[in-house]
Amino acid sequence: MKRILLIVTICFTIQLVNSQKLKGFKQIKSDTLYISLINPFLAPVEINLTALDSTKSYVKINPYGLLKEKDTLNNALAIPLERIKDTANVKLNEFLDFTAKFGTPNETYDTDYEYELPFLKGKRYKIIQSFGGKFSHNKPHSKYAVDIGIPIGDTITAARKGKVYYVKEDSKEHCKTRKCIDMANKIYIIHQDGTMAHYLHLDFKGALVDEGDIVEANQPIGISGMTGFTTIPHLHFVLYKARSISIPFRFKSIKHKILKHGKYYRND
């Protein structure tokens, strides 16, 4: 008897410093379940797959993919049906390890670019934590981040022209521990040179832009809030290259390359 082709949408979590999800679909052909992965974002995603020691004798893997926006890694994983208890509920982490991260590796970016301060002209705010801050800016994904003490309800602006590729604004939650790290409302923007700016801790329904929007430098994009892993209201601004690696940057009209902890800065 010939098997019927089955196509079902699935999701799983991207292993980043946050909780975005790739999409995918399943197909059954000749007693084998094939899973393909889809990049639903408007930014490139790099995927690495490795079979577990317990499954590598029978699964087949397409181990690497650099997916452009809306692209697909076909037949990323093939599993014999005899090894699956329930084809409607396949858990990928039972068969493989995987990582998926935004950006294109080895892409050259503009190290001399000067960014706009991410708040309105004429406003003045205090730096709560700068590069290498001991509280939470001490890992590769956060080493070159700044926390700006922007009160709840104030306007956040784009630091550079780019395309919005992710928006989250549905959270009202915050706490003082990392268990709330995925609860932060946020906006991600990718720039022409492939760098990616993340704006975090926005207010509930605090996004003024949508995914796919092209924004200009100094354009209002969101409203400051207090969501996610935070003890006080602020904007967490960080610039990334591929593989979730934060990179140093500098702002226009600032004499020092690094914003100093405890100092106030005005956007003139």
Image (spheres, grey):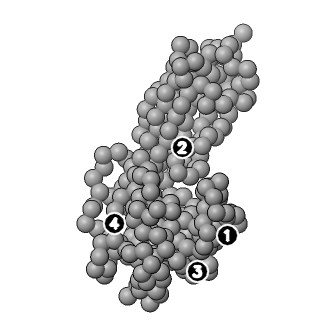
- The disc placed on residue 249 is 4
Q: Is residue 100 visible?
A: yes
Residue 78 spot, x, y in % from top left: 56, 22
Which image quadrant is residue 109 in? bottom left
- From the viewer's perspective, is residue 49 above or below residue 229? above
Q: Nearer the viewer, residue 145 or 194?
A: 145
Residue position for label 1: 204
Mark 3 vs mark 2, CA separation in Å: 31 Å
**195, above or below 48, in the image:** below
**Quadrant in the picture for the N terminus:** top right
Q: Amino acid at mark 1?
A: Phe
Name, please, the residue furthest toward the left: 112
The numbered disc on residue 151 is 3
Residue 101 is tagged as none
**Which one is in front, 151 or 92?**
151
Pointers 2 and 4 in contact (CB under 8 A)?
no
Residue 165 lies, in percent from the top left, at 50, 58
Mark pair 3, 1: CA separation: 14 Å
Which badge, 3 or 2, is on the more N-terminal residue?
2
Q: Furthest-bottom residue in view?
A: 122
Which of the image's four quarters has the C terminus?
bottom left
Element type where label 3 sits in the image: loop
| Residue type at tag 4 | Phe
Labels 1, 4: front one: 4
Dot 1, how many residues are within 10 Å of its Cα: few (below 14), some (14-19), or many (20+)?
many
The amino acid type of the residue labelled 2 equals Gln
Residue at 64 percent of width and 63 percent of height: 176
Left/right placement of residue 102 relative to residue 111 reads right
- Determine which residue is flagged by label 2: 15
Q: Earlier in the sequence, mark 2 or mark 4?
A: 2
